[in-house]
Amino acid sequence: MSTYFEQRNEKTLSAIEDILETLPDFAQQFNVGISMRTMPLTRLGYLRDIRVFCDYLIKRRFKGKFVYQLTLADLAALEPEDIEMYIDYLSAYSLDGKKLSCKEHAKERKVSSLRALFKYFYKKGKLENDIMTKVDSPKIHQKPIIRLDVDEVAKILDEAETGEQLRGRQKTFHEKTAIRDEAMLSLFLGTGIRISECVGLNRTDINFSDNSFVVTRKGGSTSILYFSEEVAEALKKYLEWLDAQIAEQTPFGKRITDTDALFISSKGSRMTPRAVEMMVKKYAKVTTPFKKITPHKLRSTYGTNLYHETHDIFVVADVLGHRDVNTTRKHYAAMSDEIRRDVVNKVKLRDKDDPPPPDDDDGEE
């Protein structure tokens, strides 16, 4: 049986084929050219951004053409100003009859996709110039990091266990999912894994002999991570419950269709990222109503807590699976303030406990 990630790649590759049918020939060349060093999800993201750019070109720069008729010669005819006008266009545009808009981070991502496109063909000698080197990236204003405080971590876990503040259908449904939800929240808060890493876990990935588990990272690589006894207890409790439900095949009144998956949905299949997001939102809404908590914010919570305990940003980067420690610095910028506070008294100008130097005054001024 194929894994969650293999199934996801198959769907992504199918989506890539579909979008390539609407794009110029150079998009196919680009997709094949970068396939050896990028994952399907990355390529799909690039192609979606290129589609928006091509749609802009036929509306504003090459009127009368269809998207599929655009060529590398058309790209070569562009000036840096054309890209700057495109970035401005992204503030409010339409695609397939839908009105859309991009904020700072979305603009930055689309510009990054164009940088990859132009750089590829410039290196291949099919473009004489890479105009993207003359285009500035949109300015990004860093937002404050949202995470759970220590008492809020306890609150959301307690709510998952008891469901005291839930009402109506959520209260009724909670009776069936409480053990699963508490285990999943504990895993997020105790290891900092990504939502895709969580939903991709199989039961066989968990090893209670040393409290470790195998996780598939972004890019397809695997790592072994470890969890605490507190997380282990929540997972064991959940798996005992799940074993009993599998024996009956009716955990939520539905037949289980994926017995390999660690976390099962109310439909009896592997949980989806969307379902996990809704689960987290449900408990966060009643425990931390003034914070928009998502699975990624739980990851930020773990990363910050880990840094507070270790004061080692390289450890945090390794555990979170960041290839570049600068990514960790960017997402956990508050750590810099912690470092500055921590080192204030580390450097001594004078040690007052030391005896004063001997008086060698010979009476001369």
Image: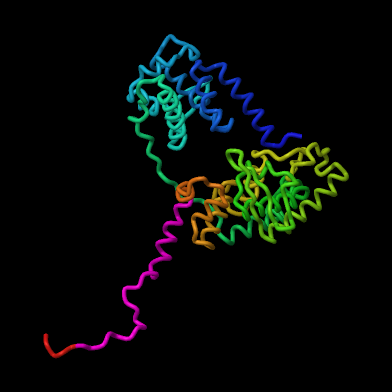
Place of residue 23 in the rendered image (x, y in percent of width and height, measured from the top left): 52, 17
Spot occupied by residue 215 in the image (x, y as percentages of width and height): 65, 46
Q: Residue at x 40, y 15 (%)?
A: 74
Q: How many numbered marks, from 0 up?
A: 0
Where 333 sits versus 350, above or below?
above
Q: Please identify the quadrant where the C terminus is shown.
A: bottom left
Asked whether residue 213 is drawn in magenta, I would say no
Question: Is 348 contained in the magenta span?
Answer: yes
Q: Which residue is at the front of the view, 245 or 38?
A: 38
- Residue at left 74%, top 58%? 209
Range covered by the magenta-colored residues: 332-360
Residue 170's spot in the image, x, y percent? 71, 46
| Quadrant position of residue 344 | bottom left
Q: Residue furthest top?
A: 64
Q: Quadrant of residue 6?
A: top right
Q: Position of residue 195 (x, y in %)?
A: 62, 43
Which residue sits at x=64%, y=52%?
A: 225
Q: Quadrant of the N terminus?
A: top right
Q: Which residue lies at the image location 33% right of the left edge and 25% below the top edge?
A: 80
Q: Main secondary structure of the magenta part?
A: loop
